[in-house]
Image (spheres, rainbow, N blue to C red):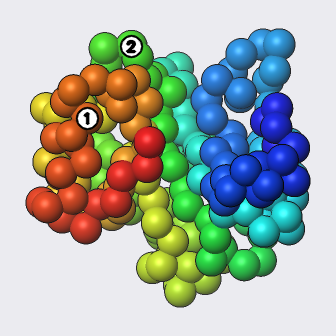
Amino acid sequence: MGFVADHASIRQGINWVILGHSERRHIPTIAESDETVATKVAYALGASLSVIACIGETLEEREAGNTNAVNERQLAAIAAKVSDWTNVVIAYEPVWAIGTGKVATPEQAQEVHAALRVWLAANVSPAVAESVRILYGGSVSAKNCDELAGKEDVDGFLVGGASLKPEFTAIVDSHKCAKAPVAA
């Protein structure tokens, strides 16, 4: 999957994997394609693992107005290989908002999450669009977590660097504002 074999993960009691993370997609020496990520998602599901599948656009793609097209392309690759979405969580992580100091507004996050549900309804099924959890993973912090958690289509967070800071407890507690589970 990444650098750990599925059987080793399962033996260690690890039931979840994160696939398609921006570093694996955008670091030139790794450069995982949409197809590679989709293959890994299908493989992990077949190995009885649950998957957090990451998707998201770069700053250049966003500024060019291609946010939805990029996310739909990445999601379409996964949809072509997955028939049962029960153990799939989608993490929208705008690459331009990860560790750059630029942060998506809660409205921008909601807009993308809603668009993902529309795409899923049209291309997978309305049931999957309604039931799949979509996490937000773009520089979540104690300052923005409550407002993000209150957005209708934001089902939780994929937290990176903030999980190592004392403010992480505020992010975990943001579920009190809404339905948002937190994955770190």
Whether residue 63 is situated above or below residue 171 in the rendered picture: above
- Residue located 36% across and 25% down the image: 164
Q: Position of residue 30 (x, y in %)?
A: 81, 21
Per the image, label 1 sits on a secondary structure element best described as helix
Q: How far from the left and from the top, in percent, is residue 51? A: 66, 57
| Closer to the camera in the image, 11 or 112 | 11
| Quadrant location, the N terminus | top right
Residue in view at x 33 percent, y 46 percent: 109
The residue that disc 1 covers is 168
Q: Is residue 116 left or right of residue 100?
A: right
Identify residue for label 2: 100
Residue 80 in the image: above or below residue 139: below
Secondary structure type for disc 2? loop
Point out residue 173 in the picture as x, y percentages from the top left corner. 18, 51
Density class for disc 2 (Cα within 10 Å; few <14, some 14-19, many ≥20) is few
Residue type at the position of mark 2 = Thr
Residue 21 as seen in the image, left or right of residue 130? right
Q: Residue at x 36, y 31 (%)?
A: 163
Res 81 seen here:
no
